[in-house]
Amino acid sequence: MPGWPAAAPGPPPLPRRPSAPVLGASVLGPLVDVTTRGLLGRRRILLVGLLALAPVGVAAVLVVGGSIGTTTQLTRDLYDSLVMTTVVPLVALILGTTAIGAEIDDGTVVHLLAKPVGRGWIVLAKMLVAGTAGVLLCGTSILVAGVLLVRLDSPGLLLGMLAGVVLSVIAYTAVFVTLSVWTGRALIAGLAYVLLWEGLVATFFSGTRLLSIREYGLDVAAGIAGPEAGTLGRDVPLVTGLVLAIVVTVLAFWLGARRLARFEISDAG
Amino acid sequence: MSQLGATRPDVSTVGAPPTVEVSAVAKWYGNVVAVNDITFSLEPGVTGLLGPNGAGKSTLLHLVAGLLRPSAGNVSVDGRPTFGDPAVYRRVGLVPEREAVFPYLTAREFVRLSAQLQGLPVGTGAVDRALGTVELAAAADRQLATYSKGMRQRAKVAAALVHDPAVLVLDEPFNGMDPRQRLHMMALLRTLADEGRVILFSSHILEEVERVAERVLVVVSGRLAASGDFREIRRLMTDRPHSFTLRTSDDRALAGRLAGRPTVSGLTFEDGRLDVRTADFATFTRELPVLARDAGVSIFELAPADESLESVFDYLVRR
């Protein structure tokens, strides 16, 4: 169909801003700010907080119950079987999917997308906020739980555990943020990854351990703990876990930014 | 555009009007066709996108706003394809239909966020200006969660206006507004258009479009059923065949009179009811009382059989 008949020559043309490129780093602050407030404003942050506190609760019960003598081993078991298997991945899953997935679900993401903002900065802001929240929650939790159990007698173990938590939280949240951009069922997909892949497959087939974020964290924890690692000890060197975790994080960021750049909103009608 | 400025130095500080081109655009999801082979272009002024719910209006607006990738065809603003190019949002403001806003922000924070993400320098007054334009200045420091639907709508408009976009796309902007807010929004759209902007808004309500838009695009079932000046569309809608149901004191006698008239294209009567089809609405409605009086027939009831907007749209599609 041809265009409209020519408009009346009435109004003066609008002032036209020189068309600048897409905005960069200057938008990171506002994006981080709104994401943080969104995360804190949602009720599920309470759930995340409770989940993150679980190791502290368990440690407190053990101390009160007087399980003295084997506490160093208990700490390792707590770390291996509760913190790294359940607490860290689930906290990261909820934070990562909430940071952007919730905005995609309720439609508010449009208010970020309809702006001349490089898509990478949106993804980066989401990852930064989810990662920082996860590090603060899980890091504090493992430090408090560890100190409750082993006092300051095994500083290497404490430091190793902390480093392992920090590294895996960052990698997990990055992956889960990207998963939320790729699929509306990120929570299910993330749960499947954590429970089925890391929980079952990677446990039974040692070869697949190189594809498990949990293993990267444990590698680093054991590497830093050194002789205090005990049963946490790995046959994979620290640097492998560290490098793989960084590769996974960077890859997740790249894939997330790429996907968001071609993102199509879903409410058709 | 710099070339334009070079050849016309007297207009180097002002820009050419924005152009929005939609050509042969289709959007499908699997087997479902949401929008099919739509072509139009927009010039400064208000264009109403009219159609029943589910006709593909939102899809079309999202295609224009670069939030959906056309399955076929092209959408461009100022000659640049809109999808996958965030830079287009320097020229385009979008007011989405979904009510969702960040509930934990105040309106001022929400509009300020928009200004920051547009790269506007702090302290230019753009935020206050946008809030004032939609008459939210007084309530600007309340959280959006406490807002009524109409207020949220206005907050979204303020956020979309803060960078003074040349193209403004609004999806069902009058939804949830009370009559006073509606009038204010209509006046606002008119003002913005008079300043040279391209305004495209969708509505499923004929009267809204009629009151504010100078041009209309009618979309039905994903297709462009009609487009052009509103009076043109109005005439099409009035001149289409109309059906009436009559209850009279003597159906047979009236039918006999009607049967010979050129304005009547069809007649059936059954169950004490007379159905009449006419191709000439205006003449028929003038003729009918005269014919009835001459025949000595009393009309108890005269009801249009197909006055729903859907049947109007239906006609436009089949036309």
Image (tube, helix red, strand yellow):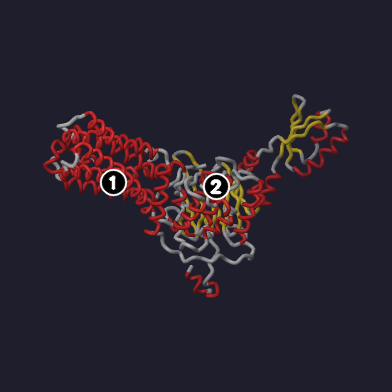
Q: Quadrant of residue A210?
A: top left
Q: Secondary structure at mark 2?
A: helix
Q: Position of residue B104 (x, y in %)?
A: 47, 46
Work out whether residue B54 or residue A242 is closer to the camera in this orientation and state it.
A242
- Left/right placement of residue A148 relative to residue A29 reads left
Identify the residue shown where x is 49% and y is 65%: A17
Judging from the image, mark 2 belongs to the subunit labelled: B
Badge 1 and badge 2 both on one subunit: no
Q: Secondary structure at mark 1?
A: helix
The answer to whether any part of residue B124 appears in the image is yes
- Left/right placement of residue A122 relative to residue B32 reads left
Mark seen at residue B152: 2
Work out whether residue B214 or residue A159 is closer to the camera in this orientation and state it.
A159
Q: What residue is pinned by disc 1?
A: A170
**Where A55 falls versus B67 (above or below)?**
above
User: The residue under label 1 is which amino acid type?
Assistant: Ile
Work out whether residue A11 or residue A96 is closer to the camera in this orientation and state it.
A96
Q: Quadrant of residue B271?
A: top right
Q: Residue furthest left?
A: A227
Q: Quadrant of residue A158?
A: top left
Q: Position of residue A128 (x, y in %)?
A: 33, 50
Q: Position of residue B106 (x, y in %)?
A: 50, 50
Q: Position of residue B63 (x, y in %)?
A: 49, 50
User: The residue under label 2 is which amino acid type?
Assistant: Arg
